[in-house]
Image (cartoon, grey):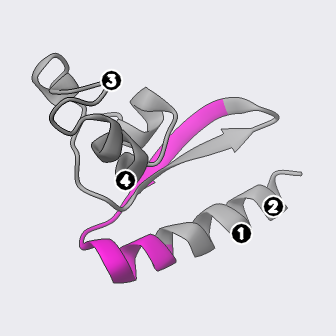
Amino acid sequence: MLSAAAVTQCRTKDVAACAAEGASLMAIQTNDPRITLAAGGYPLFVNGKIAGGIGVGTEEQDCAIAESVVFVFEELTK
């Protein structure tokens, strides 16, 4: 299953902000079961194209973990 970060090509934290009540993507998660609004999902790009995504659990610690993984991934795929 694709992660929400891969589907939207955005951090799930950013998607959640845009999906809040009254926002431009309000209730987007009801239209696509692959989309979750839990922070901690990050897209992975290779040469500017989506290659997948990483999703981790709780917000604060897991965002730090995901950002570290994305950094290493980007360094390895240059």
Q: The disc labelled 1 sits on which kind of residue? A: Val
Residue 3 in sight from this viewpoint: no
Mark 1: give few (<14), some (14-19) or many (20+) Cα within 10 Å.
Answer: few
Sooner in the amino-acid sequence: mark 3 or mark 2 = 3
In the rendered structure, the answer to whether residue 20 lies left or right of residue 7 reads left
Mark 4: give few (<14), some (14-19) or many (20+) Cα within 10 Å.
Answer: some
Q: Residue at x 49, y 68 (%)?
A: 66
- Please state which of the two labelled residues, at mark 1 or mark 3, is closer to the viewer: 3
Spatial separation of the CA atoms under disc 4 and disc 1:
20 Å
- Please state which of the two labelled residues, at mark 3 or mark 4, is closer to the viewer: 3
Sooner in the amino-acid sequence: mark 3 or mark 4 = 4
Q: The disc labelled 2 sits on which kind of residue? A: Leu
What segment is highlighted magenta in the picture?
A: 50-65
Q: The disc labelled 4 sits on which kind of residue? A: Lys
Q: Residue at x 34, y 36 (%)?
A: 18
Residue 24 lies, with reference to residue 61, above or below; the image says: above
Q: Residue at x 23, y 46 (%)?
A: 37
Number of the label disc, if any, that sits on residue 24: 3
The reply to whether the C-beta atoms of the residues labelled 2 and 1 are less than 8 Å apart is yes
